[in-house]
Amino acid sequence: MKETLYTIGEMAKLANVSIKALRYYDKIDLFKPAHVDSETNYRYYKDSQLSQLDLIKSLKYIGTPLEEVKKAQEMNPWDLLNFITEQEKLIQMKLDNLMKVQQNIETVKKRMERHLHTPSLGEVFLWEEEETTIIEMAASNIKPNDLTNASYSMLKKAVEPISGFLNTGYGAIFSYEPYIHIEDIVYSKIFAPVLNNQMLSMVPAGMKVETIHAGTYVCIVDAYHPEKYIHNYQKLMEFIETNQLTVISDVYEIFGAMHYSANNQEEFIIEVKVRVA
């Protein structure tokens, strides 16, 4: 049975692909014309080749690399079924990863909204906190003046493979005491919030997963400055004493960048909070 030959333009319309794509497939030996005129170099295709294009288009649609498509073209039906099954598994893995990314984005949005809705800087307020999972490690003689301490880099390396998204801050823990000078405050732990609870088995040695419990917290937020820091901490203590609140946790300090532009001077926003009853 004689088959009709189609020009590259006609084949492009029949198969709903671009002429550019057909030329590229020819160039990489993925899909070649049935005939090339030796004088004009015009490409011609035949009806039976449409099924080859169907396979290419289908595998490309599900994200299969063209090199893998080449291999699939040579498979028998059983091998092709196994190949497509493996592609399905890869797609499911991508969907699972996208779900994690979506969860991370939602968590970061909540934290950013939380920070944007805090009262005026330097004012003490009560806040109902949700439970937060953190990765913590022992602090080695780190104080509030050490915001860029190298130990935080160690935390960052541990958290990024787990969260993989913008971290809204790092933190430190110290005991609730009536400090007079900022130099008197020494952190017992430093930590990083975790955006989701998956992959926590990847936490490196020397670090562990802990929880900042949900509850009522007395908080104060301000731009970081050594002289303002101890003053704000004392305002927090005064609020607790005036309102006859009972402190039932260590002090949690969380800091993050105020902006991300290289054109602005580096500044940090500091939140200091303690759980009360």
Image: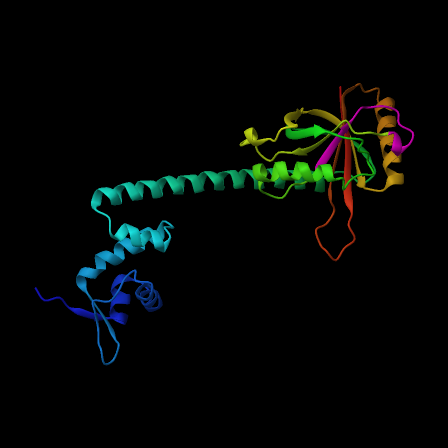
Name the side, left or right, on which 37 lies relative to 192: left
Q: Residue furthest front?
A: 205
Residue 151 in view: yes
Task: Residue 88 in the image: state x and y as whole percent.
Answer: 35, 41
Q: Quadrant of residue 5?
A: bottom left
Image position of 10 with respect to 146: above or below: below
Q: Residue at x 88, y 24 (%)?
A: 178
Quadrant of the frame with the N terminus: bottom left
Residue 176 belongs to the span the image colors magenta: yes
- Residue 43 drawn at (x, y percent): 25, 72
Quadrant housing residue 20: bottom left
- At a point 70% along the width and 51% down the height, the residue shown is 260
Q: Residue furthest right?
A: 180
Q: Quarter of the image containing the C terminus?
A: top right
Asked if the stretch drawn in magenta spans residue 183, the answer is yes
Please name the residue shown 22% across and 56% down the image.
Answer: 51
User: Residue 242: where, in percent of width, then height?
Assistant: 87, 23
